[in-house]
Amino acid sequence: MKTTTQKPPEPPRWARNLLRWYCRPDLLEDLEGDMNEYFERNLTTKGVRRARWIYILDALKFFRPYTIRKPKFLNLIIHWLMLGSYLKTSRRSLVRNKLFSFINIIGLAVSLSVGLLVIAFLTDLFSYDQFQEKRHRTYRVLTRNESADKSVMDLASTSLKAGFKIRETIPGVEDVTLIRRGFYSDAKVSDETIVPLEATWADPSFLKIFTFPLLKGNPSTALKEPYSLVITEKTARRLFGEAEAMGKTVRFDTLNYTVTGVLKNIPKLSHMRFEALISLSSMLGQKADSDGGLMDWNNIYQNYIYLTLPENANLSAIQAGLDRLCAAENALLDRQKINLSLQPMDTIVLGGRLSNEIGVNVPKTVVWVLIGLAFVVILSACFNYTNLSIARSMRRSREVGIRKIVGALRGHVLGQFLAESVIISVMALVFSFLLFLVLRTQFLSLAPQLADVVSLDLSPQLILYFLAMAVVVGLAAGFIPALFFARIQAVQVLKDASSLKVFRHVNLRRALIVIQYTFSLIFITATLIGYRQYRGFLSFDLGFTTENILNIRMQGNKPSLLKKELAEIPAVRQIATSSMITSLGSLYGTQMKYQDKAGKDSAMAWQNFVDENYIPLHRHQFVAGTNFKNRPLSGNETEVIVNEQVLKRFHLAKRNPAEAVGKQVILDNKPLTIVGVLKDFHYGTMDHKIEPTVLRYSADQPGGYLNVGIKSEDYPAALSSIEEAWRKIDKVHPLKAVFYDDQIEEAYKQFDVMVKVIGFITFLAICIASMGLFGMVVFTTETRLKEISIRKVLGASEGGLIFHLSKGFLVLLFIATLIALPVTYLFFDQYILTKFVYHQPIGLSELLMSVLVVMALAFLLIGSQTLKAARSNPAKVLKSE
Amino acid sequence: MKGTNLGEFEELVLLTIAALISDAYSVAICDELEKYTGRAAKLGVVHAVLNRLEEKGLVKSRMGEATNARGGKRKRYYEVTHTGKVALTRSKEVREALWRIIPGFNLEGTV
């Protein structure tokens, strides 16, 4: 401990200050003395650490009614009276130092606008589902599925069976509702109106648990009878126009449904959205025979259960009930475990990542990243304010001195400067609000998903948050300068202003500049690396070509019909069919089995059903074998084409492709002969390794896609003729055709959005840091103008002067670079990029580029000012003394 | 509680102040109390009692001279006022009166 130093250990300063702060002045002196005496005594008997600890405890313990200082209302009144004076002096100082005011206000305004955006975004996210009256006691049942190979999947969905069982066996549950998704069909109202509709099956409790008020119809019976349909106002207008919807019949496929209720439109901030509800009983009756698996315990992918509990329900008892239920059911399963748990409704939108999410879900990391970015930018602007205010303090120290002599206390000066910074920050808020309005539209148009999730609409509550934020930022920015001014000794300042130790805080200011530039560099490097990776994903060699291929979603039509129409268009080069589009993130797997003399083996394989034109169109490369030879029109496939990974995984024919051709594998219980082996290609996205993948033959897939090779240079004309062909075969659905390259771009859209957001923040951060640096350079050169002149008179060269002046700043930038680059590199190398199996290496060029950009800007700022100072005429400067 | 009635601890503190004569300040009072009663007297408790006694007018205080010890802070010396003395005497009389009416109270032999 510190006993060896000459100075005896002192009691903790903060504890003493606390005591001084709260204690009545007439009691303070002897009490402090008493505590000191005890401290000294404890020092010898109990050691430094204990003595300090006891001192702190005592300081806290003496906080009692009889020791507390009564607040001086006079002080508060003085603050209030002086407000006019503060405003006046603040205004004068703002006007006098236009450059600094500009830097402060614009910096704060720009950074605040980002803050406002984040606040608006968060406010929207936190107001999700607020309209649900029972939200505090509504829970969703989550499923954790553990399969034989130990892979765990957390699902938002669950099984219908669980819902029925919970209702029957678990006491203490108020209401349970069962929901099933996956109803997509064309609603036929009359011969003219056929509208594609997406509906949700729900049982009668649905309208009891959720606050979706019915405009027409009886909530307790609307979803009871089979083939009941409850539609939203919006859907009603689409189906029936202005006509009355209640009691009307709508035909889906071959069945008639009756409209039994019209719901008020679903609020935008609802995690669950639907166009129409269909009574669950209609599905149970309809599919009970054909799909026996519907009520299976492991049918967990399409159903959702929500339940309400009574107030103050015992959650652990309910969970115990769920565990019992799962244990009983899991015993009947083969090598699979399904566990249920409850998720409060409030946490759905900002909850963790779950598969099969029913609606809106924003990952928490996104929220934290946004908060972090806004925080850093605002902090940077606050640093500018702090830096420039302290640097300029010499100019205003006289004002403070006079105030103190006239009778201002420390608290008053503190109040004055805090008031000033809050005023500036509120002024900045006005600008930032305008910026916010512009940014808002930009932000929402970044990705269509964003506009779908949040609206960022203004509300009185939001405005209040904005104001609160401006005040907090003002206080944070002004705190250190205010403290600095409050500590000024009046006599000393008035005697000689230069005696003020402006440069005492020089280390603090240097540290702030280094932090600003470190963040700027981290941001810009992150942007450049991110952009490079994103471009890398787009131009990555997938193992096949995606150029000039138009993918048309069949939407239930027969491909052969459209094929015939398209074949007549001259711009169409080649037509293939596939059940899905690979490399976009969707996966479709099945169990693959292989048997040879060594034994049986089975593994998961990804698959795609294609026709014989698919491989030539996409220019997949054969390592061995050929395209499909047997081309059955429906069902009876006999052949399969595999990739190299399949051979590797099953150790098929000793991994020799040529020998593998002709071997048999079993997929979906069908024996299929390998006719070709493809070079490995990307079935998933870049964050997935290439895994065993197979192509199977299917000529006519109504649910799939047509892949159309286009040769025309005139894409609009080709597209319009394709659209014409589409309309001949389907009059209900609009054509859904997208170029493969665009689809890939869309699949990596999130990275594009991320790069844009971080890029924008980078731009702001660099601007703010540059403005701050500029202010500091201007200030330093101004205060050192005389020194420069004397140096010049004594014979210093211009170059030497510039070096002399900018040396200090360059060292700071250098330190910032030394911190920022390794941090960014390690962050990406060790953390971000490890999540992507296939990624570009981090090039030296990105790192150097970022340093170059930031440095060039800084050089320009420093250079221009120092050059100006170095070129000044020493005679003029020195004459004015 | 306010008035001339003394609590047990208050009485002890008051007696200690009287006993210390011109050297009665908080830390010394604590030490003295500890010495005679054998139980730990916490500064916080004593300080509060001193404050209350002064409020009741049983003691008065004055600040001493500043010394190098105690971080240069002065001591507050306490002195029993006339009211304080009256209260002490009264509480002693009450006790003695009570002792007198207990017949043949004898501790000899039991201790």
Image (cartoon, coloured by chain):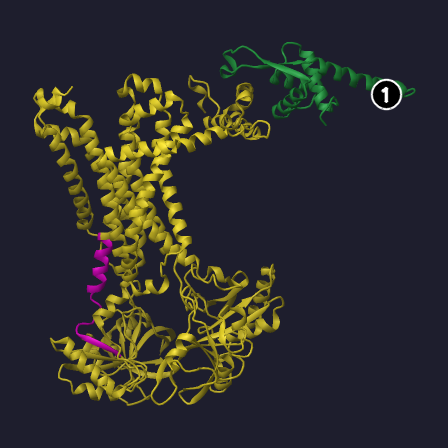
Chain colours: A yellow, B green
The location of residue A434, given as percent across then percent down, is 29, 51
Residue in front for this viewpoint, A500 or A261: A261
Residue A630, can we see it? no
Residue in front for this viewpoint, A10 or A86: A86
Which residue reaches farthest right? B103
The location of residue B96, given as percent across then percent down, is 84, 17
**Up-down relation of residue A806 to residue A576 (above or below):** above
Q: Chain for mark 1?
A: B
User: Residue shown at 27%/74% (left/top)?
Assistant: A581
Which quadrant: the C terminus of chain A?
Answer: top left
Per the image, label 1 sits on a secondary structure element best described as helix
User: Residue shown at 39%/75% (left/top)?
Assistant: A234
Total labels: the figure holds 1
The location of residue A614, given as percent across then percent down, is 22, 80
Residue in front for this viewpoint, A381 or A553: A381
Crowding near the residue tagged with mark 1, few <14, some 14–19, many ≥20 C-alpha atoms within 10 Å? few
Residue in front for this viewpoint, B50 or A841: B50
- Give the residue type that dot 1 points to: Leu
Residue A389, can we see it? yes
Left or right of A491 in this view: A763:
left
Left or right of A218 in this view: A643:
left
Instruction: Report the span colored magenta.
Output: A528-552
| A182 part of magenta stretch | no
The location of residue A331, given as percent across then percent down, is 55, 72
Q: Which residue is mark 1?
A: B98
| A542 part of magenta stretch | yes
